[in-house]
Image (cartoon, rainbow, N blue to C red):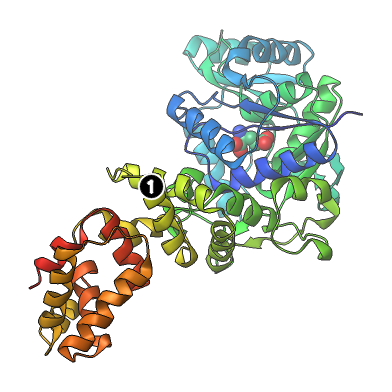
Amino acid sequence: MKVRVRLAPSPTGNLHIGTARTALFNWLFARKNNGSFLLRIEDTDKGRSKNEYTQNIFEGLQWLGLDWDDDPIIQSSRIEKHKDVITQLLKKGLAYRCYTTEKELEIMREKQLQAGEAPRYDNRHRNLPKEKEAEFITEGRSSVIRFRIEETSSVTWNDMVRGQMYWENKDLGGDMVISRRAPSNQIGDPLYNLVVVIDDAEMNITHVIRGEDHIANTAKQILLYEALGLQKPIFAHTPLILNTEGKKLSKRDGVTSISDFREMGYTPKAMTNYMTLLGWSPPEQMGEIFTLNEAATAFDFNRVNKAGAKFDWDKLKWLNAQDIHSWSSEQLLNNLNVVWSKEGWELPAKAWGLKLADLIGPSLTLLKDGLDQSRVFFEKPALQEDALKQLSLDGAKEGLKSIYDLLEENPWDGNDNTFAKNLVNISSKTLDIKKGVIMKSLRAALLGSLQGPDLISSWALLAMMKKDKDRIKDCL
Ligand code: GLU
């Protein structure tokens, strides 16, 4: 059996980390088994689906490196097929029209709650006499279509993550709505639990891998597979991603979409590495840092945990820093340049960019940190309080003046660091000012603050751009 899995996102929001993790597990399983990873955009909720979200989902998956096979299926293009299946179910008596109004449903729910029962549809229109139905139609009542769920039976399946699963049909909420409310001579829009079954079967999906919040849906879907005589896939329900309090991760935790993580400066390698660890334990010899392809070679569902996976920002940041620190100068420059360009900063020369990348690279955790840390090299900084204080100390200005005069005679091209060190030494000796005072004052003048990366390397970057002399001059 050739493995065929799919991601079936609804384009009602940007690609969420939970969906991305589901995509990742599907991708890993497909690649491990030389199978296909397919994409189906479930856009049947017309009110909430948007094209821009579909684009965001495509872009997010591409950015993560989760490439899919074949063209994506757009679910809404298959609506006629879905409606045909509903017609068949109606003809076979496996589904029926239910004319219960919203008001009546509400009263039913109220009564059940008062009696301490779980809310469910009481199947009241399951065997509606013809005359009663005609009456409802004359009244102008609209109807939904419901699929019959036999209460006395149960559903079982062997889940790849959770093992043997068992659901009593009576706990499925009564006969299931499979199409939205519509005038009673029409079939309303078909709903998720039905269309997912029709489409998965049509796409020959062998394994359905999705979040455990779909477990109750799976029970319902299995009943539909059986009623329609379709081949059932194997199911795997992956653990949810939880926040530090153990609750389902939500927007309130500051974690939303993959594009947000990208914006924040996380790298695709760190993201996929981290998401793989969210719910999967790698074999010991693999360690915690690995590429997508390495994970794909080792991935299997025996190592997927049942318990929810807690989201750990520190771990993600650590992986991100590891990834950035492993890059070549060239790779780092290319990535930083994207961040810089967004800020409107132009790279004056590649050699300069490489030098800056080498200077700040080791201290970066997020790519975005590269913005703040590069700012002083692109824009003249305002002098911070610590810098002003430094410049007011005895010897500070004299030291700077001496450096300035030496540069006037013989400017530095930023290439040989000993040249700059000599300027400091000469000034210190001739004026009898401590080297430390001159260095700190230079730092204040050149970088606007006493914090920052190595002074001489920073100075070299400014010297290459012929910006050092002016900054010193402005502090004299
Ligand atoms: N459209 C559904 C969702 O986004 C698909 C779930 C499934 O994989 O069946 O939750």
How many callouts does the rendering have? 1
Residue 175 lies in what quarter of the image? top right
Side (left or right) of 387 relative to 26: left
Residue 48 lies in what quarter of the image? top left
Nearer the observer, 75 or 418 = 418
Residue 289: x %, y % from top left = 69, 60
Note whether 367 is above or below 60 in the view shown.
Answer: below
Q: Identify residue for label 1.
A: 339
Q: In which quadrant is the N terminus drawn?
A: top right
Note whether 424 is above or below 258 in the view shown.
Answer: below
Residue 401: x %, y % from top left = 11, 75
Side (left or right) of 82 relative to 320: right
Note whether 374 is above or below 61 in the view shown.
Answer: below
Nearer the observer, 288 or 250 = 288
Side (left or right) of 216 relative to 53: right
Side (left or right) of 175 relative to 110: right
Give the secondary structure at mark 1.
helix
Around disc 1, counting alpha carbons within 10 Å, would you say few (fewer than 14), some (14 to 19), or many (20 or more)? some
Is ligand 1 within 8 Å of the beta carbon of the residue shown at mark 1?
no
Residue type, numbered disc 1: Val
Q: Quadrant of ligand 1?
A: top right
- Identify the residue at horizontal 76%, vertical 18% (top origin): 202
Residue 90: x %, y % from top left = 72, 14
- Identify the residue at horizontal 63%, vertical 57% (top origin): 274
Nearer the observer, 305 or 25 = 25
Is any part of residue 83 visible from this angle?
A: yes
Among all residues in the image, which is located at the extreme right?
1
- Identify the residue at horizontal 14%, vertical 64% (top origin): 408
Residue 242 lies in what quarter of the image? bottom right
Is any part of residue 240 visible from this angle?
A: no
